[in-house]
Image: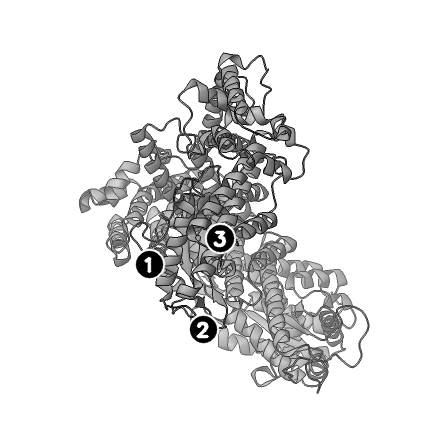
Amino acid sequence: MSVSPSSSASGAQRQQLIDAARDALADIPLASRCRGLPSLLHVTTVSRFVLESLQRDPALLERLAEHDELRRPPSREQMHMRLHEALSACNSEEALATTLRTLRREWMVGIIWRDLCRDQCASSEGSVKSAWDTAAAVSQLAEVMVQGALGWLEEFLAPRWGRAWYKDGGAMSLIVLGMGKLGAGELNLSSDIDLIFAYTHDGDTQGGKRSLAHLDYFTRMGQKLIRALDSTTVDGFVFRVDMRLRPLGEGSPLVASFAALDRYYLEQGREWERFALVKARPIAGDIEAGEALLERLAPFIYRRYIDYGAIQSLRDTKAMINREVRRRGLHDNIKLGAGGIREAEFVVQVFQLVRGGRDTELQTASLRRAMETLSALALLPSEQLTALESDYLLLRDVEHVLQAMDDRQTQDLPDNDADRERLALALGRAGWPQLEAELDALRQRIHSVFDAIISSDDEPQADDANGPDVPEWHALWQGDLDNEEACATLSQYGFVEPARSLSLLRGLANSHAARAMQRIGQQRLDALMPLLLASIVSEYRQTIDADSQPAEHAPSSARLRVHYRDQPPDVVLARVLPLIEAVLRRTAYLSLLRESDGARTQLIRLCAASPWVAEELARYPHLLDELLTPETLYTPPDRESLTTALDMALLRIAEDDEEAQLEALRMFKHAQVLSVAASDLAGLRPLMQVSDALTLIAEVIVERVVQIAWRRMVGRYGQPQAALVQSDAPGDAPGMAVIGYGKLGGIELGYGSDLDLVFIHNGTAGGVTDGPRQLDNNVFFTRLGQRIIHMLTVVTPSGVLYEVDMRLRPSGNSGLLVSSLSAFGDYQRQHAWTWEHQALVRARAIAGHSQLQRDFEQLRRDILQQPRDRSALRQEVVSMRHKMREHLSSSKTHADGFDLKQDAGGMVDIEFIDQYAVLAFASEHPALCEWSDNVRILETLSECGCWPSDAIEALHDAYLRYRDANHLNALAKRGARVAATAFAKDRERVTACWQHWMEEGSVEAGCR
């Protein structure tokens, strides 16, 4: 960073500064080895503080050189050892103050020297490479000083006041949280240190002449610590201490217990305090307790959902700063002015606050690490982020030089030629004009990025992007129009029942939840509603325009609109308003919908297309986060991506926190199913892929639930005893497998389907687990099964994972919850009814012990391939189908409609035909056992030549059309019934096949 004093570009001003420093050095009795240091003149020319320090203590430089601290920083351990040695000789608080200040001055001179002499020290280990290194060194100095002072005070004052103690006998220390740049480990050279003091619980001190309540003791200890660090003596100060970030700020108690902090932040915590706590870090006292405190406060700091409300709060904070800048004329302040340090930090901090609850990697006090995480998560373009960091570091370099001049906290650019030249010299620039132009361009770049991400309320907003109608909607929402005018406005924009829509809007505005909102929440609602109404009308108009395009040729958004081209704005509004009401107490979502045009548009399209989606969003508002990324919303991931995403979510949670794990599983499921529904409505996925995706989501979740339950059981009871015959291959230890039946086994899950499950195990009969609390193997696996069912079905505010049906296990509800594989096989061979073998056709191992899954699949094939009397089989299958029709068919009670599933000629007829075919023909055509889903079974039947291929093709096509209609009916909440005339040709063909093959039995294997 330095420039040779003889540089011809330095100019007269620069030479005058150098000469003055040389003359001052001549009067200081420095050791000869120090006087010859090549950087001495450069450092003392820039820093009057270093020059004055050498005048006060000429031996200071020699001590730094002796410890090699002019080239490399001392380690934290070295600093602790030296400070402890010095403090051990202190016998009064005055001596403590002198010792702290003497060492602080020496170490600060070393930090400034290394910062100003980067070029000369570049080859040294630990040398300064950037402002990050200097900031870390100052932060380390502050932490060492606070820790040393606190430790000395606790020991010195113990005879007088005693100590606070934990119940286990351990000494309790004051918890010191470093805030701001100290918490981040990124202090500037002459910074205040922002602190918050806390202690774990109330009680009384013991062991001293006088017992004090913990609150009194820690308050006094905090006061002593502040005085030791902050007071200015003849030796200067250590660090100025700012306690205003504590709850309620100045005038409030200096310290607070954990319980008091919990209450405060829960009941009174303000948005700016969330920003402050992002950078909180325990730096002294009981570090472990401090970390536990921050874990308790994490839900206040980081919302579980994507928190767009943080943007507006940061805007408000920045607007307040801007007013102060204007009032005090701080435009040349490189921290607070436009394009300054604070704006660069806000750009990073907004991502931490908005996304930190979901992307927990962003939960760091360090701005440097947060920048690295932004890059890893691709939340900002890498080029933009690189430029932002580079510009930020130059501003921090400028800040450090400004403060190094006089050890004074300032961020104002100099207003005199001498200090301007000192600044240019320190930064290696030819002169002030060059540096000034560079800083102007740099600050403009930072301000542009800041504006793009957190545009200030002082500037016009882009609300007019939604068209000129917004003012009318604003007047309507605010109640400025009477009923007649409001209804006329709604009617003008396509509302068919304007009076009803107006009633819904007024109902929301006057609801108890809306009236109970705080001022900021009401402002967010008032800002959103006109935009929402304008967007609903805009989408409706585009829907009408999309009618002119065939759906198959329209863009995806138009294909989506095909599902609601007959829906007027009234319907969409009625579906969206329950969601708005649901988030009135979580106003960050109101901000999200206001800030993000894309999220608002996706919300309207999906709610208009599907009342089911609308209800899901209202029930689980965190799904709004998914609307921010249409590229992933409309493209559900494959198994690998699903597994990776779920594992990443679970890795952030402690293994013993089952409640949090289940919450993460539910949120994962809701988000992934929404993605499938969105792609389904948009026509971007064919039917088979929709069912595959929904089934895959269930499989991945069940697999993780099994793993979590298994770990819990084994941790408590140990491993179940191994089977009698074991190989040495890995993975052959006993375990349990989950078998999916019905739609899950048949890879045909729909929206809201429950899971038909059967559990089997391969543990030794009569064996026990090997843990300290032994269980019989059968009891172990039964409890494991119960645990899995509980985890899948437990009801929480986030709903359930899945409803579970276990009635297809051997002997149904009266049978064992978990059977051994051998018992399951015996039952299937000797006791199972025909309908149970039909169910086995659609069975498939989906999770659990890998070898056991393979063993089950082999057993299934063996059972299905058994030779059977086809005539007797056919009669039993037909008899079962007739019973189902009698109880489930709607033809008797609803002759005007057709039930896609249960009525004659519907889906269940095709499924029974499939199941009969597998049981009848698999002994001759084993390929029929390969698949558990109806579509692939039909395709295999055609390949095997069991029945005429044209008839099978008709069943295949009809089944796909039925299922497609059933999926869309589910999304539209219309049930399985359609018009009586719908699918007439398909029903005729299915009925003919059923009559010909099943009722009459006129076609046998190989016959055409």
User: Measured from the top left, where is residue 742 in percent x and y?
Assistant: 60, 70
Q: Earlier in the sequence, mark 2 or mark 1?
A: 1
Residue 466 vertical placement versus 564 (above, below)? above
**Could you say which disc has been placed on residue 90 in the image?**
3
Which residue is identified by label 1? Answer: 267
- Name the one closer to the observer, 684 or 766: 766
Count neighbours of disc 1 (C-alpha within 10 A) and say few if under 14, some if 14 to 19, many if 20 or more. Answer: few
Count neighbours of disc 3 (C-alpha within 10 A) and say few if under 14, some if 14 to 19, many if 20 or more. Answer: some
User: Measured from the top left, where is residue 44 in percent x and y?
Assistant: 53, 26
Disc number lying in front (2 or 1): 1
Disc number lying in front (3 or 1): 3
- Name the one closer to the observer, 981 or 900: 900
Residue 42 vertical placement versus 410 (above, below)? above
Horizontal side of residue 505 vs 671, given as left or right = left
Which residue is identified by label 2? Answer: 892
Residue 687 vertical placement versus 734 (above, below)? above
**Could you say which disc has been placed on residue 240 in the image?**
none
Mark 2 vs mark 1, CA separation in Å: 60 Å
Mark 3 vs mark 1, CA separation in Å: 44 Å
Q: Amino acid at mark 3?
A: Cys
- Name the one closer to the observer, 666 or 238: 238
Horizontal side of residue 926 vs 232, given as left or right = right
Q: Earlier in the sequence, mark 3 or mark 2?
A: 3
Q: Quadrant of residue 758?
A: bottom right
- Name the one closer to the observer, 999 or 37: 37
Disc number lying in front (3 or 2): 3
Secondary structure of the residue carrying numbered label 2: loop
Q: Residue furthest bottom?
A: 766
Q: Amino acid at mark 2?
A: Lys
Q: Earlier in the sequence, mark 3 or mark 1?
A: 3
Q: Quadrant of the C terminus?
A: bottom right
